[in-house]
Amino acid sequence: MPPQHHHHHNTSLLCTRTHQILYLLLVSATFFLTRLIDRSASPCSPPPSPSSDLFLRFSSCGGHGYRLSLKLYVYEEDEIDGLRPLLYGRDGKITPEDCVKGQWGTQVKIHKLLLKSRFRTKNKEEADLFFVPTYVKCVRMMGGLNDKEINQTYVKVLSQMPYFRLSGGRNHIFVFPSGAGAHLFRSWATYINRSIILTPEGDRTDKRDTSTFNTWKDIIIPGNVDDAMTSQRSAFVQPLPLRQRKYLANFLGRAQSKVGRLRLIELAKQFPDKLESPELQLKGPDKLGRKEYFEHLRNAKFCLAPRGESSWTLRFYEAFFVECVPVILSDQVELPFQNVIDYRKVSIKWPSTRIGPEMLDYLESIPDEFIEQMISHGRKIRCLWVYDSELEPCSATHGILWELQRKVRYFHQSTETFWLHNRSIVNRELTEFSHWRPPMPLP
């Protein structure tokens, strides 16, 4: 090869190499710039790992690192024949104010919060999920409807809802706020066994043949803690410093003839200086007031939370607001928002079959600095027990919306829906969805 050709060959090789390097640099720079612009344009930062820090700041971007995009339709009380009695009783005399108290209160609170939600849509066509408001636990307890009427009214309501029929109930949300869960609606297994149920109650197979709770589709919600304690400005009973607390542990509740509770009451008689378990008067002149209840609760390092009629227990949630470490003595309990909370950092779960002196010895062996750490973690996550506006940085509303987001499906079908080549949805008579007329036959 002549010398000049050799030189030219080297130069072209050099050029190619330089081009390749420049090209790679350009691609890398573009990639990093794009990432940077994306990051600054999107308010979502990567989710904190729950193991590194319990506190999750929920905003328009939540703990899952992607945007919350959800369209929720809330049924109006006059829109469906039968909905009013499920809200206000057969005579329409029960008010939301009657129902917002106590463990039933979440039915009212969630309804009111979703009515104000920025994710609410008035257009059924675009809705991802449909919320069915009822205050039925309260209505039943106050004599507004009996069990048979509740059952008939639910069935009547569901047969008036074309969108319920369309999805087989899969995108419809119901709240059942008590230990009975959806069993309050006797025929739940026939009609709403595919719907999303919000309930504080998990497994009920110890009481009935079937549990209404299904991990795959249902959502555990926090119990309804007294508003005066969850107020961010100033709770009406303040926590005590650890060294000022008189007892190692306490159990404040009725025996209800439950084995675990009876054992605790016996244990308190054996070790009255360590375990406080007063006989609670819930009626009459010696009735324990709300304020006195929380003043008792704050006077121990550990608040014992055994099961009652069912596995969930309000004491677990209340303990966080007096900064007492909850000890769960309910083996089948299900806890809310387990995808963002590591419960080992804020509570203890002890076998209910081992309630006895050994449990007190164990609790006594835990150094105060460990207890302080658990209390400090608990302060960060207790906002998730508060039924507050989604405009707050953290609340039960955020937790529920994020859980609902995970339940959204692009496509729904039921045993009574069919579709044709032009994508139209029809029923067995091949009638198009837009022409369906209530009442619709239910399974």
Image: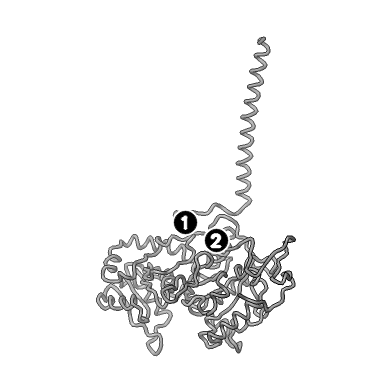
* Residue depicted at x 46% and y 59%: 54
Question: Quarter of the image containing the C terminus?
Answer: bottom right
Name the mark nearer the viewer: 2 or 1.
1
**Distance from Cα at disc 2 to Cα at disc 1:** 13 Å
Q: Is residue 7 left or right of residue 338?
A: right
Number of marks in the image?
2
Q: Position of residue 215 (x, y in %)?
A: 49, 65
Question: With respect to residue 353, does 5 lie above or below?
Answer: above
Residue hosting label 1: 50
Q: What residue lies at 39% left-to-right and 80% top-to-bottom?
A: 292
* Residue type marked 2: Phe
Residues marked 2 and 1 touching at CB (< 8 Å):
no
How far across and down, in percent of the image, does residue 401 sit?
A: 57, 65
Q: Is residue 87 visible?
A: no
Which SS class for mark 1?
loop
Residue type highlighted by circle 1: Pro
Q: Is residue 104 visible?
A: yes
Q: Position of residue 295 (x, y in %)?
A: 38, 76
Residue 131, located in which quarter of the rendered image? Answer: bottom right
In this picture, residue 31 sits left or right of residue 351: right
Disc 1 packing (10 Å; few <14; some 14–19; many ≥20): some
- The residue to which callout 2 is attached is 58
Question: What kind of colouring is applied to the model shown?
Answer: one colour
